[in-house]
Image (spheres, rainbow, N blue to C red):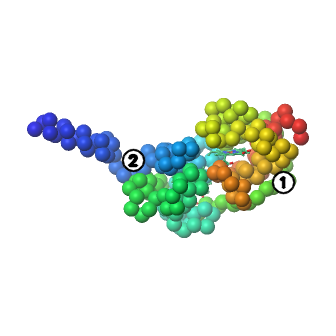
Amino acid sequence: MRRAALVLAIAFVAACGPGTTSAERGQALFSDPAMSPSPTNAVSCATCHSASSSPSDHILAGGSLLGVSNRESFFGGRERDVRAAINYCLRRFMRHPSLEPLSEADARGLDLLSYLDTLEGPSDSVPWTVSLVNDNLPAGDSTRGEALYDRACRSCHGDTNTGAGRLTQFIAAIPTDTIEEHADFARLISIQKVRAGGFYGLGGDMAPFAPEVLSDQQLADIIAYLFVGYAE
Ligand code: HEC
Ligand code: HEC
């Protein structure tokens, strides 16, 4: 009898994790790159989005998700359905191969939404502007740029030039790979990449940093740091 109860308990724990609720499972999924089955994806929701009210030094491409369940529109007003917004991130930034990664019935999608429901915050939609190149950036400061690189880029790209510590080998070593491929245009391409990610036909799955999260001055500083030691 006791043995049967134990077996049942083990089966229960194996199925659901130790006493987890849907929101708790969703919280774990939030930091799990395996939300995308792509073997070349290394990022999770948490790589790009904050879900906490405690201040952080990181500059993330995606906005805070506090209050996201109360919002009426997403992606700077381009999307009205929160699940579609998540699916967009999975496809576009996490290399998910499916057109609809999380269907209405998907258990992980429901867990993720239960978790997002627990994140209280304002219901205002978040401004987000994606545009191509500002080729006319202010002068940058490489010392400030180094600190900004650590806050905005290092988590994925690792060290500059060598790429040591980057998330995967599928993420470029910058600026070396860019210089190798684009020679004199490397600086311009780097500015475009940060501002537009894979949009405007640039391709790739890096998420753009809108001016709302990274100012032109901050971008100029990062570019100055990246190209320190390289000719103008
Ligand atoms: C590589 C970075 C990246 C990853 C990974 C990522 N997102 Fe996003 N996400 C963005 C960017 C950039 C936006 C557009 C800016 C914004 O609205 O926050 C966005 C927008 C969103 C929005 C719309 C928010 C709004 O109010 O406009 C939701 C919801 C969202 N993401 C959820 C997720 C979830 C859940 C995951 C994990 C399954 C995820 N994202 C993974 C970068 C990312
Ligand atoms: C969430 C992870 C992530 C973050 C954060 C990130 N990148 Fe990227 N970046 C990528 C990925 C993945 C690629 C390769 C795919 C692509 O080109 O979109 C890439 C590509 C690039 C490239 C193109 C390299 C080439 O020549 O192919 C540049 C330049 C670049 N990133 C600069 C930056 C800078 C500068 C920052 C910080 C402001 C930054 N990235 C932050 C993931 C990231």
| Residue 211 visible in the picture | no
Q: Nearer the viewer, residue 172 or 29?
A: 172
Whether the residue under disc 2 has CB within 8 Å of ligand 1: no
| Residue at the disc numbered 2 | 24
| Element class at badge 1 | loop
| Element class at badge 2 | helix
Residue 108: give x, y in percent of width and height. 41, 53
Instruction: Ligand 1: give its quadrant.
Output: bottom right
Q: Is residue 132 above or below residue 179?
A: below
| Residue at the disc numbered 1 | 135
State the residue at coordinates (20%, 39%).
7
Q: Please identify the quadrant where the N terminus is shown.
A: top left
Q: Quadrant of residue 14?
A: top left
Q: Nearer the viewer, residue 66 or 133?
A: 133
| Residue 157 visible in the picture | yes
Q: Is residue 163 left or right of residue 102?
A: right
Q: Nearer the viewer, residue 199 or 194?
A: 199
State the residue at coordinates (63%, 63%).
76
Residue 55: give x, y in percent of width and height. 58, 43
Q: Nearer the viewer, residue 200 or 109?
A: 200
CA–CA distance in space, label 2 to label 1: 45 Å
Amino acid bearing label 2 = Glu
Q: Is residue 129 above or below residue 164?
A: below
Amino acid bearing label 1 = Asp
Residue 112: give x, y in percent of width and height. 44, 54
Q: Is residue 62 left or right of residue 112?
A: right
Q: Nearer the viewer, mark 2 or mark 1?
A: 1
State the residue at coordinates (51%, 66%).
81
Residue 201: give x, y in percent of width and height. 72, 59
